[in-house]
Image: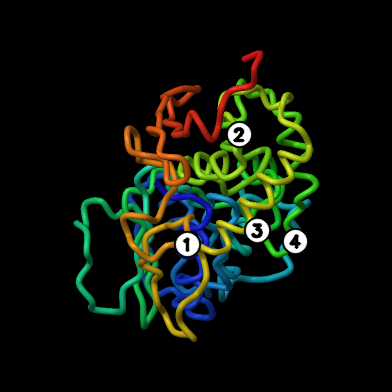
Amino acid sequence: MPEGDTIFRAARTLQRALAGAVVTRFDTQYAHVARVHDDAPITGRMVERVAARGKHLLIYFSELRGQPSGVDEAAAPSGSRALATLQGPLVLRTHMLMSGSWHIYRSGEPWQRSASSARIVVATAAFVAVAFSVPIAEFVPAGELESDQAISRLGPDVLSLDFDAAGAVVRLAGSTRPTAAEALLEQQAVAGIGNVFKSELLFLAGQWPFQPPALVTDAQWTRLVRDARTLLQANVIDPSDGGVVTWRGMRRTTGRANPSQRLYVYGRHGRPCRQCGASILMRHHGEHNRSTYWCPRCQPPPADA
């Protein structure tokens, strides 16, 4: 499942491949995305940059080249104003949910997945970026991105350079979700944490996953937020000095090189805890029936739970 670290790495690779290049081909299976391309073509625009915002991947395109400038949008008919907005800088926002992914290929290189699962294709002279099975995609005028409903509601991004840790703690402590585990997944509280990191963070902090957020102390939330930033940053370390290189290692939180020892609790139901030997437990819960893994000995419930 793509989490903040996965999206960050994908954005970094796409940035290296596409930024500064002119789009030579744009295809999509989504009618609402194709409609924008028909009205204000993406081909001929420059890819200005690619960035990650929590679990959202954002591709910034320049204004449509060769279009008349100085349009008086206030005086123009509403249809003309809308078209003028689309002809300006645009951002393609995609969200992977459970199964989506972005791939990058050199021009002419065979794709690793079937073309039937390609939802969006952005090509330049040198590279082809393909969004496979990406369920959410939309164009947003660049000037309206920060007010876009999906983006404006996001909490502090764990991997952003200006991450507001104190703000994340306040949002988590005030979460109305039933459990601390669900609060950590609430992107309006803190953006970028997914199901794997959620279980791993609670284990490292020795926190029972199912207590209400209000019962987690500020010091405990501060520890969880600090560890979240540390772990996600450790999983986006760039092993290359440059070029278009996709990070292919498996996500790890233990720091161990052995692939079988890369996580503490996630996916280890019934197996011994790496710290105490007790059997790891798993429970499905919450609105989306997500799985949470924990050690009953290292993460005991409060006495009054």
Label located before the other in sequence (1 or 2):
2
State the image coordinates of residue 296 (x, y, percent, origin top left). Answer: 48, 28
Residue sitting at 66 percent across and 38 percent down?
188
Identify residue for label 1. 255
Identify residue for label 2. 207
Label located before the other in sequence (2 or 4):
4
Locate residue 259: give its quadrant: bottom left
Label located before the other in sequence (2 or 3):
3
Disc 3/disc 1 C-alpha distance (Å): 39 Å
Q: Amino acid at mark 3?
A: Ala
State the image coordinates of residue 63 (x, y, percent, origin top left). Answer: 60, 68
Identify residue for label 3. 142
Marking on residue 162: 4
Q: Amino acid at mark 2?
A: Gln
For label 3, the crowd category at 10 Å Cα-Cα, with few meaning under 14, some 14 to 19 and many 20 or more, is some
**Helix, strand or loop under label 2:** loop
231 sits to left or right of 132: right
Disc 2/disc 3 C-alpha distance (Å): 41 Å
**Helix, strand or loop under label 3:** helix
**Mark closer to the observer (2, 4):** 2
For label 2, the crowd category at 10 Å Cα-Cα, with few meaning under 14, some 14 to 19 and many 20 or more, is many
Residue sitting at 53 percent across and 75 percent down?
46
**Helix, strand or loop under label 4:** loop
Label located before the other in sequence (3 or 1):
3
User: Is residue 71 positioned above or below 279 on the image?
Assistant: below
User: Is residue 12 positioned above or below 108 on the image?
Assistant: above
Residue sitting at 70 percent across and 46 percent down?
223
Q: Amino acid at mark 1?
A: Gly
State the image coordinates of residue 12 (x, y, percent, origin top left). Answer: 51, 70
State the image coordinates of residue 219 (x, y, percent, origin top left). Answer: 77, 40
User: Is residue 296 positioned above or below 125 on the image?
Assistant: above
